[in-house]
Image (cartoon, helix red, strand yellow):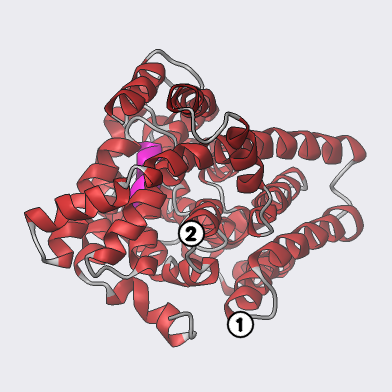
């Protein structure tokens, strides 16, 4: 088993794509072990992808692509500006609120950072913000996308670890809101004395006008979240509804979606889906090898040996995940660590929904944590600044998000009240 894990880490450090770094050690394990036959690899990979809940991933990816290309992000940003743009540092708050609203559509942090960043970073710079600060708040707020439902990482974790996806969605609502308000507070404190930052005068007329234009795209998150949490449709069915709604808005209502843009959205969705599903397929036999060798039981025994306090154990798991999130992409981490940590956590008395939400939030924070912060790279590219400049400006926001992570770790009610209220527990 030690050689199996060593081989994986060597391939990972060597720069091999994560899907192949997961699959190659399994091939050698099966060849040298002799049982089961090598054909088990193909069977395990097929079984992993033959999942109805995972169909939600291409649907939500496509819905986000369609909404972005139909230029509906601008309507959401304008409404956000009318709502809270009058506060000191208003456009920074607008950036966060727009991310919170867009989170109910895309479920992807990278999509959020690109879609919101293209609109907000130039606008914030024009209003007096430093471009690097504008990029930092954009990257920091983008991780709200996978926390407030719908959430692609939660779909991946729920489908592979056997946790209620709707329960995970419900559990992410309060933490996502807390992160949003925390980022706004930091931005407010940072811009109290910044006279260069323009203030948008409050206007009920402006708010009413922008709400009228944003009402149609903002109806989509209400339909999705309400439908999923009320049990009207499953997350996968919600994804199909999102695509249909986005198509009607883009092609019929606003007529802002061309055939070429539709084709581009389909291509990007195919690329994103293939990348995720290849990792899913490769991670299943990898997790199977770990399970056969009783890795969840070993981890549970190790954790109990340190402490029998669930909060202490969850803090230890958080530390492990924060380190993992610095080097591995979120989906890969969830697929590798989920089948190990979820059973181990349940064995020591942790609730699977709380543990699942903590895992997702912890690992999406890794998207803005160097050295492998994918949202940092995407935002730096949109803002046309150096990666190092963005890293230096991200720390205040990163600390706030870690504080929220600590709060939901110590106070389980922050993640479990809504799922319990809605009957998912």
Q: Is residue 360 left or right of residue 2?
A: right
Looking at the picture, how far across and down is residue 219, in whole percent?
Answer: 69, 70
The answer for how far apart the CA atoms under marks 2 and 1 are is 24 Å
At 69% from the left edge and 62% from the top edge, which residue is drawn? 236
Q: Which residues are magenta?
A: 362-369
Q: At numbered mark 2, what does the secondary structure look like: helix, strand or loop?
A: helix
Which residue carries the number 1 mark?
230
Residue 30 x %, y %: 49, 28
Query: Compared to 256, does 168 lie above or below?
Result: below
Q: Is residue 26 or residue 256 the one in the foreground?
A: 26
* Residue 259 placement: quadrant: top right
What residue do we see at 65% from left, 37% from top? 272
106 or 49: nearer the viewer: 49
On the image, which quarter does residue 87 sit in? bottom left
Q: Nearer the viewer, mark 2 or mark 1?
A: 1
Q: Is any part of residue 85 visible from this angle?
A: no
Q: Work out which quarter of the rendered image holds the N terminus and state it.
A: top left
In which quarter of the view is residue 177 placed? Answer: bottom left
- Is residue 411 among the parts visible in the rendering? yes
Q: Is residue 305 positioned above or below 204 on the image?
A: above
Which of the labelled discs sits on residue 97, or is there none?
2
Is most of the magenta stretch helix, strand or loop? Answer: helix
- Point out residue 120 in the picture as x, y percentages from the top left corner: 53, 43
């Amino acid at each position: 088993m030690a050689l199996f894990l060593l081989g994986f880490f060597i391939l990972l450090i060597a720069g091999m794509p994560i899907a192949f770094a997961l699959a190659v050690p399994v091939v050698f394990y099966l060849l040298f072990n002799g049982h089961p036959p090598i054909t088990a690899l193909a069977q395990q990979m097929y079984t992993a992808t033959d999942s109805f809940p995972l169909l939600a991933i291409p649907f939500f990816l496509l819905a986000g692509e369609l909404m972005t290309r139909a230029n509906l992000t601008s309507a959401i940003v304008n409404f956000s500006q009318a709502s809270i743009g009058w506060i000191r540092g208003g456009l920074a708050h607008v950036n966060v609120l727009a991310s919170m609203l867009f989170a109910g559509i895309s479920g992807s942090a990278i999509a959020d950072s690109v879609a919101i960043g293209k609109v907000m970073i130039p606008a914030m710079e024009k209003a007096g913000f430093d471009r690097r600060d504008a990029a930092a708040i954009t990257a920091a707020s983008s991780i709200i996308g996978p926390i407030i439902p719908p959430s692609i990482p939660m779909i991946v974790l729920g489908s592979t670890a056997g946790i209620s996806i709707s329960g995970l969605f419900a559990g992410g609502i309060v933490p996502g809101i807390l992160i949003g308000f925390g980022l706004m507070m930091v931005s407010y404190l940072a811009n109290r004395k910044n006279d260069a930052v323009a203030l948008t005068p409050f206007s009920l007329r402006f708010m009413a006008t922008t709400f009228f234009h944003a009402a149609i795209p903002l109806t989509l998150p209400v339909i999705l979240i309400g439908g999923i949490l009320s049990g009207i449709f499953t997350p996968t069915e919600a994804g199909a509804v999102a695509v249909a709604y986005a198509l009607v808005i883009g092609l019929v209502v606003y007529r802002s979606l061309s055939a070429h843009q539709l084709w581009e959205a389909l291509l990007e969705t195919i690329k994103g889906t293939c990348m995720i599903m290849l990792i899913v397929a490769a991670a299943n036999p990898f997790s199977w090898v770990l399970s056969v060798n009783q890795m969840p039981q070993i981890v549970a025994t190790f954790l109990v040996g340190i402490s029998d306090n669930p909060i202490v154990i969850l803090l230890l798991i958080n530390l492990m995940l924060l380190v993992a999130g610095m080097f591995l992409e979120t989906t890969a981490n969830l697929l590798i660590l989920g089948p190990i940590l979820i059973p181990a956590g349940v064995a020591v008395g942790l609730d699977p929904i709380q543990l699942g939400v903590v895992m997702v939030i912890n690992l999406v924070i890794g998207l803005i944590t160097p050295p492998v912060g994918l949202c940092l790279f995407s935002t730096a590219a949109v803002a046309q600044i150096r990666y190092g400049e963005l890293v230096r400006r991200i720390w205040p926001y990163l600390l706030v998000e870690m504080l929220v992570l600590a709060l939901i770790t110590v106070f389980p009610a922050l993640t479990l009240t809504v799922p319990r209220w809605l009957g998912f527990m």
